[in-house]
Image: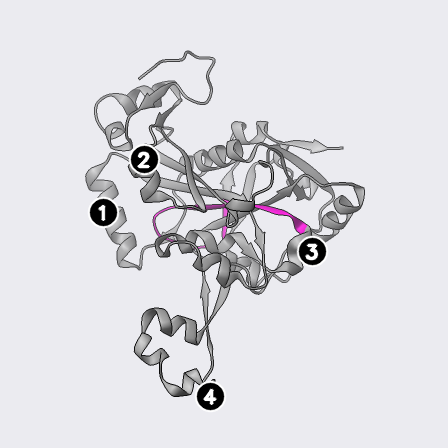
């Protein structure tokens, strides 16, 4: 543990593991000083929460209002051919909602965008965070005996399975525009009148996670699944955290056959990967996405997060 002094806004302490933060006076110190404690990312934790396409970047604890843990992961569905690191992102916005002066930051589920019928032709997408798998492919994995039936093999019976993800709230940004023409097109696509520079995406992911962690009351979720109930029970019985916030971020990968991208991700991580694939028709948007989740499924399709001073300080209007 090291105290770095009052000039370090990001972290005052380093802790060996998240569980240890629930013991002793650590939370009292964090609450009193309003700082955060970084957790050490062990190889075991990185392997548990990540894979080739998903990298656990960082984790930290805060005790603003209540104790919470934030885990930040970077997702890239094509890591082997990734471009140069993305160090600058923007958001196309109406100036009256622009982050530098905003009181709230709007996030929304994939379902919200599938049903979207407002202004801006580039906002709604009826296939948002879904991908289609052929019935034969599905049966080959889960019921090989059925997949060998002659009717399927001869193509007499066909069909597909649509997989979707609605367990996250999404915050959509883009890579810095490459010129005036691209900027003008995307302003029209998103029904926007200004471009907001947001800087480094990893920093934004951390501050977005912190802002959601500080929310009171907590974001409304439904815990209808047994896994969600077990996770919530373990959180309360084995740690002193009131909530865990996970923020995944990364470039959207464009492909008309998203099945190939998503099925390459290990089964336990596919729900997180699905929102980072979109159809080629949207490729001109060069989107960079953030997906925020807690334990449970969003009860509301829109999440309005109070804009913290740290979030606002990252944003500036591009003139």
Q: Which mark is residue 15?
A: none
Q: CA distance from mark 3 to mark 2?
A: 44 Å
Q: Which residue is mark 2?
A: 43
Q: Secondary structure at mark 4?
A: loop
Q: Which residue is mark 4?
A: 156
Foreground label between 4 and 1 = 4
Q: Is residue 297 magenta?
A: yes
Q: Residues within 10 Å of mark 4 (few under 14, many from 20)?
A: few
The percent position of residue 68, horizontal first and vertical second, equals 34, 34
Q: Secondary structure at mark 3?
A: loop
Q: Which mark is residue 233?
A: 1
**First in residue order: circle 2 vs circle 1:** 2
Foreground label between 3 and 2 = 2
Q: Is residue 145 above or below residue 259?
A: below
- Residue at image position (73%, 47%) is 187
Q: Secondary structure at mark 2?
A: helix
The percent position of residue 80, horizontal first and vertical second, equals 52, 45
**First in residue order: circle 3 vs circle 1:** 3
Q: Residues within 10 Å of mark 3 (few under 14, many from 20)?
A: some
Q: Main secondary structure of the magenta part?
A: strand
**First in residue order: circle 2 vs circle 4:** 2
- Residue at image position (41%, 21%) is 11
Q: CA distance from mark 4 to mark 1?
A: 48 Å
**First in residue order: circle 3 vs circle 2:** 2
Q: Which mark is residue 120?
A: 3
* Residue 120 or residue 133, whichever sits in front: 133
């Amino acid at each position: 543990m090291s105290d770095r002094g009052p000039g370090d806004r990001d972290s005052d302490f380093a802790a060996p593991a998240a569980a240890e933060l629930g013991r002793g006076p650590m939370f009292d110190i964090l609450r009193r000083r309003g700082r955060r404690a970084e957790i050490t990312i062990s190889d075991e934790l990185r392997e548990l929460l990540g894979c080739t396409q998903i990298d656990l970047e960082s984790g930290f604890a805060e005790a603003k209002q209540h104790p919470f843990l934030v885990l930040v992961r970077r997702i890239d569905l094509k890591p082997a051919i990734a471009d140069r690191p993305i160090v600058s992102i923007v958001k196309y916005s109406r100036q009256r909602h622009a982050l530098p002066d905003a009181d709230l930051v709007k996030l929304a589920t994939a379902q919200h965008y599938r049903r979207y019928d407002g202004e801006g032709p580039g906002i709604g997408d009826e296939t948002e965070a879904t991908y289609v798998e052929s019935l034969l492919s599905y049966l080959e994995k889960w019921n090989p005996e059925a997949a060998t039936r002659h009717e399927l093999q001869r193509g007499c019976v066909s069909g597909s399975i649509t997989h979707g993800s609605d367990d996250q709230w999404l915050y959509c940004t883009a890579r810095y525009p490459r010129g005036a023409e691209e900027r003008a097109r995307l302003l029209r696509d998103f029904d926007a009148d200004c471009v907001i520079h947001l800087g480094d995406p990893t920093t934004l992911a951390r501050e977005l996670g912190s802002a959601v962690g500080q929310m009171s009351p907590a974001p409304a979720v439904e815990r209808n699944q047994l896994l969600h109930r077990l996770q919530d029970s373990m959180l309360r019985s084995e740690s002193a955290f009131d909530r865990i916030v996970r923020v995944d971020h990364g470039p959207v990968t464009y492909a008309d056959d998203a099945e190939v991208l998503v099925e390459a991700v290990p089964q336990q991580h596919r729900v997180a990967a699905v929102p980072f694939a979109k159809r080629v028709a949207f490729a001109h948007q060069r989107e960079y996405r953030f997906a925020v989740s807690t334990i449970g499924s969003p009860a509301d399709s829109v999440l309005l997060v109070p804009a913290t001073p740290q979030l606002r300080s990252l944003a500036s209007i591009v003139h």
